[in-house]
Each structure stands twice: as structure tokens, then as C-alpha cells.
Amino acid sequence: MPSCTPSRRTLLGMLAATALTPPPALAQSPHQTIHLFVPFTAGTGPDLLARILGEELRQRWNQAVIVENKPGASGNIGTLAAARAEPDGNTLLVTVNTFVMNASLYRSIPYDPETGFVPIAEIATGVLALVVHPSLNAATFEQFVAAARAKPGAINYASPGRGTPQHLAMELLKLTAQIDLTHIPYAGSAGAVKDLAGGHVSAMFLPVHTALPLAVSGDIRILAVGSEKRAHQAPDVPTLAELGFAGFDVDLWYAVLAPSGTPKEIVGRYNAAFNEILAEPNVRTLLDRQGLVAQGGPPERLAELIAKDRARWARVVKEAGISAE
């Protein structure tokens, strides 16, 4: 699962704020307790975002907000639980773009990312950086491609697991650059990053805020970022689009959705609240520290993103012959 791991102090603060939520007073909406379902474990990007949004909602609406982690099956278990919830505005899903990728990776999933939910808002994005171990002797992206083409399949790369955004990002790069790399899937990010820094694997896509300290210490080299624009945390690192792959965009994106059938007025109220929250300087600063960029926008923008990414990753999965099963 893609993760954006917060500092221990930040996460403990968010956990405490949510855990100590008082019983709801007279609500400013027809809702009672709000449940934010996160289909991944505590400490991941969706979990951090749910706790930030939940605390802000609690303060604004004077309502109890509970973050419920429901991990398993690459997010499918928690996502299905959210899809089956009553569409009354009391239950929302906070997730990452694995939500869309799973539709192509699994022979069948128990929800449809376009019809099973009502989009509320894209809440944040996280930049992925293409990195290599110094032993690969590739100081630039061009040298990396040349080395891969010289010995097809000889260079291996790590990911946090089959079907993760980092895995699919590298498979898209392989298709686009016409190179052959060998995939080494791990059970999570920690082992993959450790082996990358130790030189046991040669390359990986990493969240840029994770990559930067390792680059400073000399454990890895950052060759490019996979976003449309340069990452403000690493302004000197070129994008893959600048290096010749126009339209190459493999950002992690995070979103909030409601079960299908949730009334339009409820969706609108949440959308307005989340846009206000994401515009707050303190929230933007907090997200920036975790390598995330606050987004926002109307529900229609998220709906377009879901449809576009579903088609794009379906093509990549088919052409690369990927399966999560």
C-alpha cells in the first residue's frame, strides 16, 4: 500500500484528537456521528488525511468524527464496507488511487469505482520520484535508460507490493521508455526502502519526501519525478515529461467519496467544508511536511480523474500483463 508516513508526534496528536472526540452536541446538519472509513492501516497517507479532516470537521460542525481503519486485500475490504454503508452522509471513504487501479488488477472486485460511490473531493496529491542506488552507475535518467537497454532485465526494481501505485508507475515507465526491468515486490514500503538503500535492489519509485533524506545521505540518487510539474521540495529535479515523456503523471492522489445514493446536498456540504479546510494555511503546512500537496475542487473534477485514471491504468495493466492475484 502506498504510504505517506507522518512523524510520530504528528500522528500521535491526530490519534489523540480523534480518540478524545466528545459526544456530539446539537449538530449543525442532519448527521450524527461521522464515520471516516480508511481501507488501510494507521500511519498511511489516507489515515493521516482522514484524521486531519476529521478533527477539522469536528471543530467546524460540533459533531463526533470517528476514523475507522479497515485494512486488507489492497484496500478492497474497507472500500466494500464503505460502499455498503447507508447513503445518509454519516459514512465516507478516504482513500488513495489504488481505489481505481484495483478495478483492473483483480478479476473481480466487490465495488465499482465509478458507480459504487459519489465523488466528494480530491484532497491531496503526493509526488513520486524515480530513484536508483549509486552502485547502478547511472547519474542521469538518460544513463539509466541506456543501462537498461544494454542489458534487458538485468536491472531490478522494488515496490511495496504487486499492484501498488509504485509498481504500476514503473511498469508505465517500462512501456513508455521501452526498457525491461525485473520487478521485486515487497510486503510494504519499509523492507523495499531498506534494501534499496543497501544496494540489494537498484531502482524504485518513492514518495519524494522519503527520497530526499536518502539522497542527502548518499544512499540513493534521484533521477526524476513522475509529476506533471517539478516538486517544490526538489525544484532542481526534472520531471519525466521534461525528459521526453509528455503527459507522464504518476502522482499519488487521495480522495473522499460517499456511498452511491448519497443526496446531492450532503455531498455539496462536505465538498464546501473540505475545500475550506484544505485552504487553511496550517492544514497546507501540515500536509507539506508529509510530502503532500492540498488539492480540493468540485466533485466533478474528482469524477473526471477517476474515469481518466481507470482507463489509463487498465491499459497499463493489460499491456504489462500485471495481476495482483
Image (cartoon, rainbow, N blue to C red):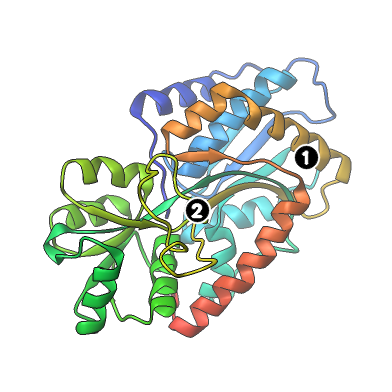
Q: Residue at x 50, y 53 (%)?
A: 252
Q: Residue at x 55, y 71 (%)?
A: 313
The amino acid on which the numbered mark 1 sits, given as a three-letter code, is: Gly
Query: Residue 121, percent across and down?
Result: 69, 45
Query: Which quarter of the figure is the N terminus placed in?
Result: bottom left
User: Marks 1 and 2, how far apart in space?
Assistant: 26 Å
User: Helix, strand or loop at disc 2?
Assistant: strand
What is the number of the mark on residue 89? 1
Quick one: 211 or 166, which is closer to the camera? 211
Q: Which residue is mark 2?
A: 252
Earlier in the chain: of badge 1 and badge 2, it is 1
Report whether residue 186 is seen. Answer: no
Query: Which quarter of the figure is the C terminus placed in?
Result: bottom left
Query: Residue 119, percent across and down?
Result: 73, 51
The amino acid on which the numbered mark 2 sits, given as a three-letter code, is: Leu
In the depicted structure, whether residue 97 falls above or below residue 232: below
What is the number of the mark on residue 29? none
Quick one: 165 or 118, which is closer to the camera? 165
Query: Residue 221, percent across and down?
Result: 23, 54
- Quadrant hosting residue 133: bottom left
Rate crowding at label 2 as few (under 14), some (14 to 19) or many (20 or more) other CA atoms within 10 Å. Answer: many
Quick one: 6 or 308, which is closer to the camera? 308
Report whether residue 292 is seen. Answer: yes
